[in-house]
Image (cartoon, coloured by chain):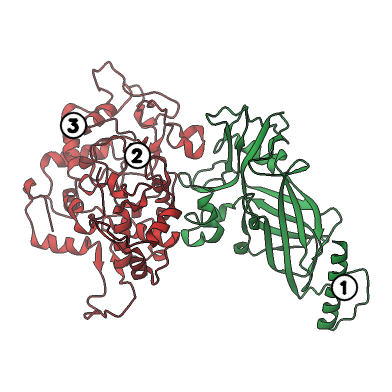
Amino acid sequence: MKLKYISTYLLSSFLVASIALVSCSNDDDVVIDPTTKGDLRIEFDNVVGDRDLALNTGNYQNAAGEAFTVTTLNYYVSNIKLLQADGSSYTVPKDSSYFLIRESNVESQTVTLKNVPAGEYTGVQFIIGVDSLKSVSDISQRTGILDIGSGPTNDEAMYWDWNPGYIFLKLEGISPVATSANSKFYYHIGGFGGRTAKTINNLRTVKVDFAGKKASVTKDLSPEVHLLADVLKIFSGSTQLSIKANTGVMFTDYSQNIANNYVNMFTLDHIHAD
Amino acid sequence: MRINLKYGFLPRRSVYALLMVLFGLIVIGCKSENDTPDPETDTPKPVSWVKPSHFPEPVYDMSKNPLTAEGVELGRFLFYDGILSRTNDIGCGTCHQQSAAFTHHGHDLSHGVDDQLGTRNAPSVQNLAWSTSFFWDGGVHDLDFLPPSPIQNKVEMGETVSNVMVKLRNTPVKGAAFPVNYPKMFKAAFGSEEINTERMMKALSQFMLSMVSATSRYDYYVLGDATAITAQEKEGLVLFKQKCGSCHASELFTDFSFRNNGIAPNKIDDQGRYAITLDEADRLKFKVPSLRNVGLTSPYMHDGRYKALSEVLDHYANDQNSSKTDSIYVSPTLDTLLIPAGQKRGIRLTAQEKLSIIAFLKTLNDQQFITDKRFSDPGVGTVL
C-alpha cells in the first residue's frame, strides 16, 4: 500500500509537472492547480462495531444486549458537499448527487464524484435520504437511482407508493427477541416533511471531518475516502433502540429517534491518496 | 350522443351543437390542418383536451404530458390489461368498471390477487384532472405517481412496477387470447420502443385525464336547458346547495378536503388521513368524494358501509333508526358542520327533503360517460 502510494505519488507528480509545465518546487505538497478537475471516490464500508457487516451470517449484539443478524441494509446518500479547511466547499451538482448504498451490492458502496475541482478536502457533508425538493419533483425527474418503477429503488422497495416518498434507510434482520411471527425486525425510515401537510421529517445531514487528514484532488490524483458506517450506532445514541420493544418502525413518530441515532453512524477510517 | 331519453329529456339541436363543442373532450386533432394523414409519420397525433366551460381550471399540468391519440390509447390498454397484476388477471378496470362510473360494482371492499380483500371502497376514476390528491387518505398528490399504489399493493395487484415493465417488453405473447404489442404501442406514443416508468405512468395519466364526466342531465341544466331536470330535482338541487354544498362544492361536487363525517370507526380502526400526516387533527378524516355519478357508485363511504343513498342521508340527518338514536360518532375531529349550536348533531332533513336531494343526485348520472367507447375495455380486461 505504502509503496503503491509513493510510486503513484511520484508518477502523478511527474505527470503534473510535465504536462502542466509547472516545476515541482515543493517535495512535500501535491501541486494543486485549482483550475483543473479530478475524481474523488467515497467508499461506504458498513460495519458492526469493530467487525465487518456480513449479511445473514454475522451474529451481532446491540447496546440493549439483543442478539441480531442483518438481512438488509440500504440507505440513500445525496447532496454531497466536499469541505475545505478555509471554510469553502464544493457542492456536487445536484443531479449527480444521489446514491443508494446497498450492503448486498459491492459496486453501490463506492460513490464516484467526477469533475471535482482540484483541491485539498478536509471533510464531507451529505444527506441521508432524498431531499424534499427531489421528493416532490415530477416523474421525469425520477431517473436512475430515483426511478420509482425500476432498478434498485423498485427492486429493494425503497419507495412508499401509498404515502409517496423514498425510504431513506432500511435495516432488516432477524433477532430471537423480535416480536414478529417470523422473528424479523424492520426499520424503514423515511419522511421528507410533507408536501401539502407537515409530516415527520427524517432528512438528516451528516458531516464527517477528516480530522487533519486531506483528500487531495488533482487532475491526476483521485483520492478515495473510506468511511465506516456502524450499524450499532443505529441502535444507540440519543435513544437506545430495542428490537424487542420496537420490532417494526416505519412511518411513525418513533422513526425520528432512529434517524437521530444513525446520523452519527459515519466516521472516517482512512483516505487513499489515489 | 347518447342521452338517457327515458327521462323524457327533449333533444334540442342547438344545445346539442353547443355541447358537442363544449364537451368534445377528446377531439382527435389536426384533421382540419392535415386532411391526408401521412402513414409514414411516426409523430403521435396531438389530442385537444377541452375543459368543460362550467368547470374550474384543471390541476394537472398537461403541458408536461401533452395528450396524444397514441398515448391515450396506450393508457387505455394498460388500464384494462391484467398484465399489471402478479396473477395477470387483475387490471385497473377490474375494480374500476365503466358501467359503475369506474367503481367496483356490488363491492363494498374490492378483492385483488388471490381473492385478497382490500380495506377501502374503490373510488371512481373520473375528472382526475381536477384532483388535488388521490385515494381516500390523499396520500398521493400527483396522478403520475398513482398507479404504483394499486400495482404494488399486496392485496390489490401484488406486482412490482419493475416486473410489469419486464412483462410489457416481452409482448406480444404468443397464443394470448388478445395479443398486444406493447413495445410497438410505446413507440407509437413516445417515439421509441423503450418502456420505462415515466412513459408507463404518463400513458396511464393521459387515459385517466381523458375520462371527464360532464354530460349528465345536471350539466345540460347548468348550461341552459331548463327542461333537463324536473321540478323535484330542481328543488333537490336548491336543498343540496344549502345542506351539502359546503363540502360537496363546485362543479366537481367536492372541496377536496379531508373530513370526519361522524361515521364510527370500522373494525380495523381505519384512521384515514392520519396515517399520511400522523397529525392528531387528521384522525378519522377521509377525502370528501365527488358526487358526480353518485347514483351509479354504490356502495358508499370509505369502506362501502352504506348501500343506498337514503342510508347516507339518514346518517347525516342523524335519524337512522328513530329520533332518539344518535348515529353520529363523536370524536375530537368530528366536523363542526355536523355540530349545530344548540341542536342535535347532524344536518336537519325532512323525509321529503331527502327524497328531493336523492332525486337531484341522480341527475349527476352521466350515461354518456359510462357508455363512451373511448373509455371502454379494448378487449384485454377482466371483470371479477
> Residue B127 at what x, y percent from top left?
30, 52
Crowding around mark 1 (Cα neighbors within 10 Å: few <14, some 14 to 19, many 20+) is some
Which is nearer the N-term, disc 3 or disc 2? Answer: 2
> Residue A192 at what x, y percent from top left?
57, 47
Q: Is residue B292 left or right of residue A82?
A: left
Which element carries disc 3, helix, strand or loop?
Answer: helix
Q: Chain of mark 1?
A: A
Q: Is residue B155 above or below residue B197?
A: above
Say which residue label 1 marks. Answer: A10
Q: As rendered, which of A60 and A259 lies closer to the eye?
A: A60
Quadrant in which residue B100 is drawn: top left
Do labels 3 and 1 touch, CB within 8 Å? Answer: no
| Letter of the red chain | B
Say which residue label 2 marks. Answer: B114
Give the residue type that dot 1 points to.
Leu
Colour of chain A as rendered? green
Crowding around mark 3 (Cα neighbors within 10 Å: few <14, some 14 to 19, many 20+) is some
